[in-house]
């Protein structure tokens, strides 16, 4: 169990660093696929292939994981959790609100005034990425079904 927690921690730490490479790589592969279709003159609408769906799954999944990890890491101080508000330079005595989804962490003053620590773009990226992930997953299942039907 301890090794699993270490692995998950490592994934969350490395995800924001690896996300840009995965998104750009999958995006470039999608662009090459589109360019090849355009050069062949078959740039008309047709259901996406399984490979295209997998590339979109990789892009969406890495964007979701990267944004989620960035949000979690931006709202925590690993060395001294009590000093996170002072380290960020925001008014607040202590961290009151923590939520996993949507990612939220606030520094709250004794007067009840709160300042959000998670960047504004994290939660929209996570939710749009999850929606795109679901659509790509459904499209991949459909692509596999079409391929199985054609094979019969």
Image (tube, helix red, strand yellow):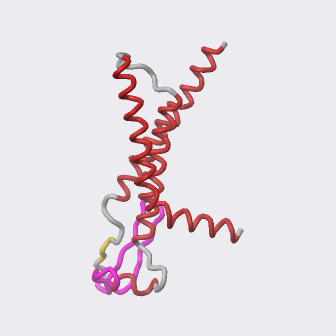
- Residue 120 vertical placement versus 149 (above, below): below
Return the residue nearer the eye: 147 or 124: 147
Please tell me in which quadrant of the rendered image residue 11 appears.
Answer: bottom right
Q: What is the quadrant of the N terminus in the image? A: bottom right
Which residue does the image show at 46% across and 83% down from the upper left?
81
Which residue does the image show at 44% across and 79% down from the upper left?
77
Q: Position of residue 73 (x, y in %)?
A: 44, 70
In the rendered structure, the answer to whether residue 93 lies left or right of residue 152 reads left
Q: Position of residue 40 (x, y in %)?
A: 38, 18
| Residue 43 within the segment the image draws in magenta | no
Which residue does the image show at 46% across and 86% down from the upper left?
80
Which residue does the image show at 41% across and 58% down from the upper left?
67
Return the residue nearer the eye: 53 or 129: 53
Return the residue nearer the eye: 65 or 20: 20
Q: How many marks?
A: 0
Magenta residues, start to end: 87-111
Return the residue nearer the eye: 29 or 87: 29
């Amino acid at each position: 169990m301890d090794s699993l927690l270490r692995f998950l921690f490592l994934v969350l730490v490395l995800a924001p660093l690896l996300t840009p490479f995965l998104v750009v790589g999958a995006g470039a592969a999608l662009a090459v696929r589109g360019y090849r279709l355009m050069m062949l003159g078959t740039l008309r609408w047709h259901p996406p292939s399984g490979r295209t769906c997998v590339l979109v799954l990789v892009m969406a999944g890495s964007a979701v994981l990267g944004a989620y990890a960035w949000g979690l890491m931006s709202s925590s101080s690993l060395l001294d959790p009590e000093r996170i508000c002072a380290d960020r330079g925001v008014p607040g005595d202590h961290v009151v609100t923590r939520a996993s989804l949507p990612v939220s962490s606030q520094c709250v003053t004794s007067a009840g005034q709160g300042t959000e620590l998670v960047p504004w773009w994290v939660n929209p990226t996570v939710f749009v990425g999850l929606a795109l992930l679901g659509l790509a997953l459904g499209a991949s299942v459909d692509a596999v079904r079409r391929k199985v039907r054609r094979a019969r």
